[in-house]
Amino acid sequence: MGYWWDRVVLPVRRAWLGVASRFGVRQTGLWRLRQEVSTCEYEDVHVMWEMLSRTTAPAPRRPSRFGPQPRPWGSRFRLCRGF
C-alpha cells in the first residue's frame, strides 16, 4: 500500500491540486448547499435562495498580479519631486 500511495496517489493528487488552483476549482460546499435548498419543502427558503443567487451588479474584477504595483515610497518623497 505504501508504494502505491507514494508512487501513484500523491503525484496524482498534487497534479489535481495544481490544475484545480489554476482554474479556480474549489471545494466550497456550494453544490451540497444547492442540493439542500432544492430539496427543502419550505417556500421561504426557496425565496431567500433566489434573492441570494440573483446578481444585479457584475462581479468585481480581481486585481492582476502583473499590473502596476503600488509605490509605497512615492508619497514620502513627494516634496523632493518639486526640485
Image (tube, rainbow, N blue to C red):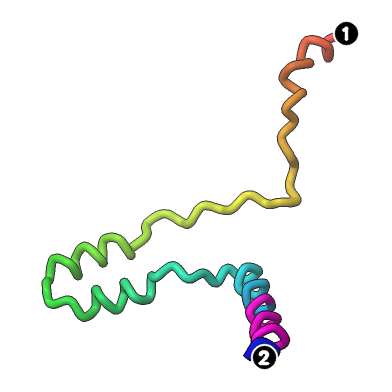
Q: Position of residue 11 (x, y in %)?
A: 70, 81
**Quadrant occupied by the N terminus:** bottom right
Q: CA distance from mark 1 to mark 2?
A: 69 Å
The residue range painted magenta reads: 4-14
Pointer 2 local density, CA inside 10 Å: few below 14, some 14–19, many at least 20: few
Q: Main secondary structure of the magenta part?
A: helix
51 relative position to 70: left or right: left
64 relative position to 73: left or right: left
Q: Residue at x 78, y 10 (%)?
A: 79
| Helix, strand or loop under label 2 | helix
Is 7 a magenta residue?
yes
| Helix, strand or loop under label 1 | loop
Is 49 a magenta residue?
no
- What amino acid type is highlighted by mark number 1? Phe
Q: Name the quadrant containing residue 80.
A: top right
Q: Which mark is residue 4?
A: 2
Q: Residue at x 13, y 66 (%)?
A: 44
Labels 1 and 2 touching (C-beta < 8 A): no
- Identify which residue, 35 or 50, lies in the foreground: 35
Q: Which residue is mark 1?
A: 83
Q: Name the quadrant containing residue 21.
A: bottom right
- What amino acid type is highlighted by mark number 2? Trp
Pointer 1 local density, CA inside 10 Å: few below 14, some 14–19, many at least 20: few
Q: Name the quadrant containing residue 78.
A: top right
